[in-house]
Structures are given as C-alpha cells and as structure tokens.
Amino acid sequence: MSTSQKRRTKFTSIHDNKDTVKSKESSNNLGATRTEISAQKIEASKQHEQNKLSQPATDMAVSGVWKVANFLFGLSVMVFVSGLHARQVYQLHENHLWFTNIKEVEREISFRTESGLYYSYYKQLVHSKSLLQGIKDLREDKLTEHPDTINVLERMNIYQEVLLAAIYRQCGISLEPILFYIYSIFSLQVVLVCGVYLLAWCLSNSWLAGLFSTTLYIFNRLDTTRVSNSGPLRENFSLPFLWMQAAALAVYFKPRQSALTRKFSLFGVGASTFLFCLFWQLNQFVMMLQAFSLFGVWVLGILPAHKVRNIMLIQLASLLAVCLLQFGNKMILGSLCVSFIIVATPFIHILGNQTSPHSIPVHLLRVFGFSIISLILMVLTNFILKIIIDVDSDEHIFKFVENKFGLGDERDFDSRLYLCLGIFGFITQDVFERLTTNWTLPLYLPTHLAALLWLAFSVIARWRLQNYSQDQKAKSKSKSSELVDFGFSQDLAYHTVQAVFFGGLAMLILRMKYFWTPYVCVFAAVGVCDARIWTKLLGWVGLRRPAVVNVVRVSFVVVLLSVVVGQLLPPALEELKVETEFWDPDTVELMEWIVAKTPPGAAFTGSMQLLAGVKLCTGRPVTNHPHYEDKYLRLKTLQLYQIYGRRSPKDVHAILKRYDSHYIILEDSICRAPSRGGCRTPDLVDISNGVSPDEPVNISGLIRSTTPRFCEAVRHQKPAYAKYFRSVLVNKTFRVYKVL
C-alpha cells in the first residue's frame, strides 16, 4: 500500500472514530432527553391519577353539602307551613267568635257539649288552692255525676288539662287561663302538620312531597280538622301525635338504617304512641287497626317479624301505661286491641319471618288461615278477660255497630242516639265532592290504587321466587327486581295497608274521616313527587339520566303546586275576611241566673250537651254529661231523659228525687223539634219506652200512649204538675223548674 493510501486510510479511520464519538454523544443526549420526557410523562400520569382520586372526594363533599342544605331547607319549609296552618285555624276561630273581646261566660259557652266539660277541669285546676289539691278534687269529684262521686282521671282522658294547668301555674303566664288553653291547642296543630309533612317526605324521599301534602291538608280544612270550631275535643290533642307516630314508623320500617337511626325512630314511635293513647279514649280502636295492619304486612312477608313485634309491644306498653295512669281503667284492659296483641305477638315470635317455599295457593291459604285463627283467638281472649276483670262499659259500641248494619235491637236508646247523629253515619257525598274539587282525590286514587296493585304483584313475585333455585332467583331478580325487592319500600307497603283500614273506618263513620283524609293528602303528594315513579315513567320514553328526570319532576311539581295554590288560595283568603261575633243571649242569661239565684250545691238535670256548659260556667253539680263511656251513666241518662218522654209528673218527680236533682232545664229546641224519622230526643225516649213516637216509625211492638209529653205539659203549670215542679226561669230558649 502506498504512503498516500495509508495516510488516507488513517485519516478516514480517525474521521470515523470522531463520527463514532459524536454519534455516541448524540445518542447519549437523545437518551437523556427521552428519560426526561418519560419522567415528565410519569409525573403527569401520577398527577392525573391524583386528580382522578381527588375528584370523587370533591364530588362527595359537594354532594354532602348539597344534601345537608337540602335537608335544612326542607325542615325550614316544614316549620313555615306548620306555623302558617296554626295561624290560619287561630284566625278562623277568632273571626268566628271574636273570642278575645267577648265576656268570659260567652267564651266558656262557646265550648259546646263535651268541649265545655273538658275545659271545666282545666279551669278547676287553675283556680284550685294548689295543683295537688286540684288533682285530689278530680279524683274525688262530686260535681260531674251528682250525687255520685267519681274519679275523673280514671273515667276521662284529661291529662292534657292537668299538664296545661301545671304549666300555667308554674310558669307565671300572664295570659288569661282560657286564652293560654286555646292558644296551646292551636300551637299543637304545628306538630300535626309536621307529622303529615315528615310522613310524605319519608315515603317519597322528597321534601317537595311534604310541602305538597300539607298544602292539600290546609286547603281541605273542612275535611281534615275540626280544631277551629271545637278546640278542646280530644282529637285535637291526640291526632298530632298519631301523625308523628306515622312518620316515625316510616323511618323505622326503612331497611338498611343505621343502629342510631333505628333506635331514634323507635323512641319516636314509643313516645308518640304513648301520648296519643293518653289523650283520647278512642286510642284502643285506632291501635287495633294499626295492629291489624302490622299483622297483615307480616303475614304477607313484607316486614320482618322482629320489627312488627317491637311495634306491637310498644302499643301494648303504651295502653298499659295509660291504664295505670287512669287508675286501672278497665275499658283498656278489656279492649279488643289488647286481646289481639296478646295473641298476635307470640304468634309472630314463634312463626318468625314468612320465607318458607310454598305454592301460591298454599301461601294464600296460610295468610287466610293465620288471620282467621288470630281473630278467633282474639275474641276468645277478650271474652275471658272481660269475665276476669268484669267490664261491660264498651258494650254500647258493639250495639252501635250491630244496629248500624240492622242486626241489633232497634229500640236500643244508646245505639239510636249515635245513629241519629249525622257524624256517626256513613261518609257523605259532599266529602268526595270537596276533595275532588280541591285536587286531592284525583291525585290520591290512582296513587293508592297503584300502590295496592304493586303490593299484590310484589307479594306474588316474592312467593314465586321462594320456590326457585339460586340461579333462577338471580335471573328473576335481574328481570324484575323492583317487583321482588321490598328493600326500599317496606315503609310504603305498611302505610298503604294502614290507609286502607283508615279509609274503611271513614266510609263507615263520618266522624272518623279525620284519620283518613291526611293519608289522602300524603298519598296524593307521594304520587306526584316520588322520584322513583318519575324514573319509571320517563324511562318508557327514553329519558333515563337522573339529572333530566329530576329537572322534569321538580318542574312538574312546581307548576302543579302553583296551579293548586292559585285556585284554592283566593277562597281561603276570602274565608279569613268573614268576621262574626258570638251571640247567644238566652244561654248567657241562663248561666248568669244560675250563679246569682241558686245555691252552690244545687244540682241540675237537663240535656247532656247543656249540662256540660252548666258545670263549666256555674260550677254547679250536674247529674249527667256528654262523656258517654260508662254503662251506669248511660242507664242513668236514659232515666233522667224521661223529662222528654210521655211520663206522668209523679214518675218524673220520683226519678229526679232518686238522683237528688234540684232543678231541671228544658229546651224547646228539643221538646218541640220537628219529627225526623224517629231521631228527635223525645222520639228516642219514646221508642226505648216501647211507645210509638209522634211520627210513626217502622218498629214492631210499640204502643200508642195517651200520657202527655212531660216537657210540654209542665209548661202550663196545671195542679198535677205544679204540685211537683215550680217554674223559676223562662226565656225564648230555656225553661227552668225547681223540683219540689
């Protein structure tokens, strides 16, 4: 090789080495760049992952804040609406009577019939030397059923009067006693409306349902409450706690609740059940219908046995506690409710949850059989209990039911007395007309009917599922989970059944509509506001996004609520503009005359309604009164009502002397009332005596009497009558005679 070639080769080699070095350096730089990029990517990926992890936490925090704000706003709306209703009923009462500006005696007279009797005990406690002395006087009362001494705390549910009197005396309240009393009753309606609101909220999971239900409740006032007209009635003290109990039951029956929520709701059920039972003598009948509903949802396999058993034990404990507070009131111990719970509780405990696989006919037979067996055992237990404790004071209720269906003695005075009162008749058409006009019934009927159908299909689906294999169960659940799974609707199932029982009671007895109409308002609201219903309906047209469903639901509710308020608010405001004043000068004259002209120990006989006012306004002893729950008092009342029958003056005088009556008060509105199918008080007395009334009735065995009617004949003061009775006061409404 030549020298030049060697030099060229060497140069090339050196050059190649340099290129190699440069290439390595470039490669190293590229590797470093790639490493940096990779590190940045890893860092970015980590940051992205952190953002993804922090996003749910942020969403959860926002969701939690929204839920709390929504909950607090719902509670605020509840308080506002409840206060609005209390103000409404107070204003209606004030506008009707001008209650704050009339005389005390006029205020007291405005408490008609048994309302006046209950208030008289509050008045007595407030004005007694001490609260303890007042309670002692009630335990040894000589004024209510002269000449007998009774324990008023045992016979009547008046612990609310004791409580209000204690608060008034101990707190140094500056209001007049009667104003404090009536304001307390109106304030208690806040609790009732809160109960209705919470019940609708719990059943639908939306406070909009609470607002809608209470709006309907307020605008349907004529069919949902009597508080503005008859404040002291027992229902106005007790019904608020019944609806708080209903709301607490809705919470307790929801599955998958925390232990704290279950305990809190169970405490709410216990407290409200006890207060409801304490404040109203009809507690046993309402508790019985509740017990029937509880048994029904258990035997259908909807509610677990332990929850049903817990509620029944609370009912029994509440009734027994009230029995103790009423000094062993036998009517409670001898009630059908106590007998049913005694039978049903061990029955449920032994059989447990109804999950055994059977065919549908066997399931139906089991439901029917368990129900019949329980009812038979209830009747037998009640029969034995009544023999043991010797109680028959509630027999008039069973006679009333028998006569209502034409099965009893048509001449029975007590039954006819109830049946001739419109409030104890069947529900009237005007109730349905008002509920329809006010939007409530058209919304209620499809909702309750759909709930009943859903309940029936769900029960059947569950019965069928119990017979499937595990694979079949999984497939069935995936296809029809909402039909089979009661997990989200046990509370709604119970109240669906309970509303049926209360509705049936309202159909039979008009006065009992106040148990049903709040349910009408609640179910109407649930049908409109429940998101689950809207999800199902909108899903059929392809709208399934929760946000879209919620916007549509809320918009519809707001529009419908605006329409309802727009239609019903103007008449309600017009009603608030009507102002009248209490005016009953004849009754005022009677009460003032009794106070001024008769001795404090003078005993009076007359109609039950009037004598409650006599006791309240004058403090004089009375021989009978409108609290009609004692058998001896009922027999005594029939005897004293001979003043309106065809009896000789000698017979009437002997009866009045037997009961140490000093004066009788006769009312021309009773004595000369026009005939109406044998339902006048004189007709009731005649029929009970076996005498044909002035207007013939289709009852066999009655005879025509020639004896003049006492209340009419004594007016003329002929010698045969003047010998026993002397006229001492006559006005356009009343005639008072002294018994000689």
Image: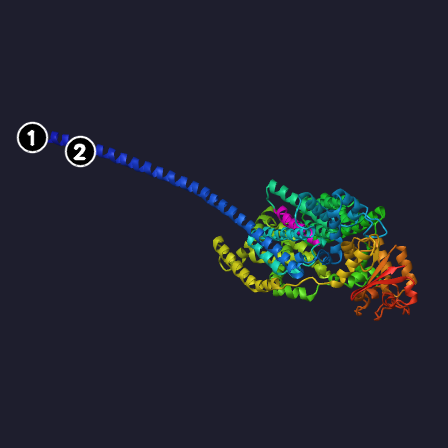
Q: Which residue is mark 2?
A: 19
Circle on res. 344: none
Question: Which stretch appears magenta?
Answer: 235-254
Q: x%, y% of residue 574?
A: 59, 64
**Residue 453 appears in view:** no
Spot occupied by residue 642 in the image (x, y as percentages of width and height): 87, 62
Residue lying at the far front in this picture: please name it.
Answer: 596
Residue at position x 63%, y 42% in the image: 264
| Image quarter (top left, top right, bottom left or bottom right) of the C terminus | bottom right
x and y percentages locating residue 461 in the rendered image: 63, 53
Residue at left offset 75%, top offset 60%: 588
Assess whether residue 313 is covered by the magenta stretch: no
Q: In this orientation, which residue lies closer to the viewer: 166 or 236?
A: 166
> Which quadrant of the structure image shows residue 673?
bottom right
Q: Which residue is mark 1?
A: 4
Residue 291, placed above or below residue 593: above
Majority secondary structure of the magenta segment? Answer: helix
- Within 10 Å of disc 1 (Cα), the crowding (few <14, some 14-19, many 20+) is few
Mark sitting earlier along the chain (1/2): 1
